[in-house]
Image (cartoon, rainbow, N blue to C red):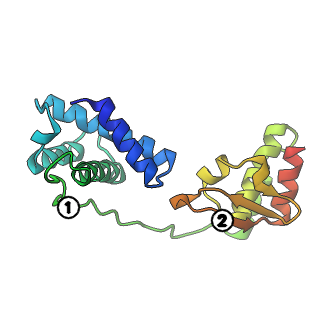
Amino acid sequence: MKLGLWQERFSEYLRLRGCSARTVEAYSGELRQLFDFLQAGQIRSLAEVTKGHLEDYRSFLFSHEPPLKLTTQSVRMTAVKSFFGFLKRQDYLPSDPSRELPTIRIVRSYVRQILSEDEVKRVIESVETETAAGVRDRAILEIFYSSAIRNSELSSLKLDDVDAARSQLRILRGKGGYSRVIPLGQQALDWTMRYLE
């Protein structure tokens, strides 16, 4: 099996479908794990892979040492199903051996208790702002509190994404590849501008 070739073909397919660079990279890494498992089982061609092999791989993930979180197992199996679905749709395989594999369902639990306004204020104000790093950290916390953007969205912000005149942030290609404009509170804007200065 030519892992590099299949990774590149699959990655290109995901990019054309609009998947984020992070998703493409993650799925490519998950394929590496799968290929290692198949090669250890003497599977030399993707055409040899059966549903039974993939069930064995799923069992391998379940009994992994150290134990893998259910979310990790779910992501790995989602990547496997996407990959074999791709192979079938592109006519690289006559059938999809992963089609009938059950999906690992993750029951998401929500935070039962959130911080009060006073607790949030104490956290934000605990940042020492005598240094540039401190001002940056305060700006980060203020932006999080003001806008509720995701960590990945904040870390990919560019200078042009801050519209100080309108007190807005432009989020380009956020979750799901969607872009949006969100309001930025005055405190967050003040600390952001202070950091940028």
Query: Crowding near pointer 2: few (<14 within 10 Å), some, many (20+)?
Result: few
Where residue 139 appears, x then y in whole percent? 78, 51
Judge whether 97 appears above or below 176 on screen. above
Q: Quadrant of the C terminus?
A: top right
x 37%, y 39%: residue: 28
Say which residue label 1 marks.
102
In the displayed structure image, the side of residue 177 where residue 190 appears, left or right: right
Residue closest to the eye, 52 or 111: 52
Q: Secondary structure at mark 2?
A: strand
Left or right position of 31 against 123: left
**Which quarter of the picture shows residue 184?**
bottom right
Residue at horizontal 44%, vertical 51%? 16
Q: Residue at x 32, y 49 (%)?
A: 79
From the image, which quarter does the N terminus lie in?
top left
Q: Quick check: 97 left or right of 157?
A: left
Q: Quadrant of residue 177?
A: bottom right
Query: What amino acid type should be assigned to the residue bearing mark 1?
Result: Pro
Binning the other alpha carbons within 10 Å of mark 1 as few (below 14), some (14 to 19) or many (20 upward) gives few
Q: Position of residue 48 (x, y in %)?
A: 10, 40
Q: Which mark is residue 180?
A: 2
The answer to whether residue 106 is visible is yes
Instruction: Work out whether residue 116 or residue 41 is closer to the camera in this orientation and state it.
Output: 41
Label annotation for residue 43: none
